[in-house]
Amino acid sequence: HLKDLRLALEPFRTDATISMLDFGCGCSPYRSLFPQATYHRADFEGYKGIDFKISETGRIGATNLMYDLVLSTQVLEHLDDVPVYLEECFRVIKPGGQLIVTTHGTFEDHACPFDFNRWTALGLRREIERAGFEVDLVQKLTTGPRALIFCVDHFFPKMLLPKKSSFGLVMRVVRRLWLHSRRIIQKQSDLHLRKHQVASESDQGHDFYIALLVKAHKPR
């Protein structure tokens, strides 16, 4: 899935000298995509090297109309008040500037420290449009059979199986075979399921997906 997420973000790579905000930055894993940018980072207190601390209300100290681009990767699911966060994105982006958001469609709970939300493509589009943005692109990431392989590979090792039952015995054998073959399965998934890495919102056969990407802009 992280490979698919990187693949989806790659088209936005630029050497332009833009001003941008990584809003909910964590360790800023995609900073290398914007090597010439004035790159500001915002997160909660405790993260090293941040330019802005996110307050309890979701606000930051950046001035209005400050950025050409706001990047938000795997942040929205952790927010208690998503509209306030998107309102803040809208406030700091220049007219004509861009917002790139990724978040989860289907995923396990992963609180850090909280985990509140999951979206459908239509629901995320609506949320971003309500904040005043015009949506240019919606993509589904890690979809269909590739999503199923990801889920099995992610959860199978963690499954608690009954010890004294034929079901438990069979599942242990299946799990052992899966773990033994996982690299081959992953390689074959990369080779044969490429169309399920990144799919357009309108593409058929992608109703089950791990994550979403939305690119939007602030009207001039």
Image (cartoon, helix red, strand yellow):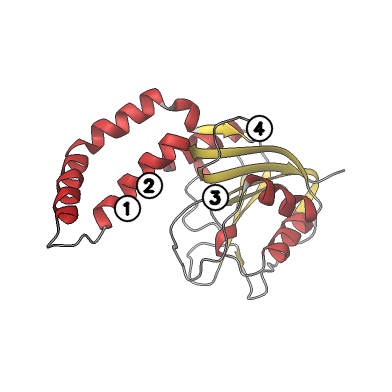
Q: Which residue, given by chain and number where applicable, does mark 1 sit on?
A: 155
What is the distance, in whole Å, between disc 1 and disc 3 at their CAs?
17 Å
Image coordinates of residue 149 in percent, x first then y, are 36, 40
Marks 4 and 3, the one that precedes in the sequence? 3
Residue 51, image quadrant: bottom right
174 displayed left or right of 214: left
Marks 1 and 3, the one that precedes in the sequence? 3
Marks 2 and 3, the one that precedes in the sequence? 3
Marks 4 and 1, the one that precedes in the sequence? 1
Q: Which residue, given by chain and number where applicable, does mark 4 sit on?
A: 202
Identify the residue at the far front of this view.
166
Amino acid type at mark 4: Ser
53 displayed left or right of 47: right
Marks 4 and 2, the one that precedes in the sequence? 2
Amino acid type at mark 2: Cys
Image coordinates of residue 85 in percent, x first then y, are 69, 62
What is the distance, in whole Å, between disc 2 and disc 1 at their CAs?
6 Å
> Pointers 4 and 3 in contact (CB under 8 A)?
no
Image coordinates of residue 116 in percent, x first then y, are 56, 66
Residue 190, image quadrant: top left
Q: Which residue, given by chain and number where applicable, does mark 2 sit on?
A: 151
- Front residue of 78/92: it is 78
Q: Give the structural element (helix, strand or loop) at label 2.
A: helix
The C terminus sits in image quarter:
top right
> Pointers 2 and 1 in contact (CB under 8 A)?
yes
| Residue 196 in view (yes/no) | yes
- Front residue of 184/78: it is 184
Identify the residue at the far bottom of this view.
56
- Front residue of 44/156: it is 156
80 displayed left or right of 142: right
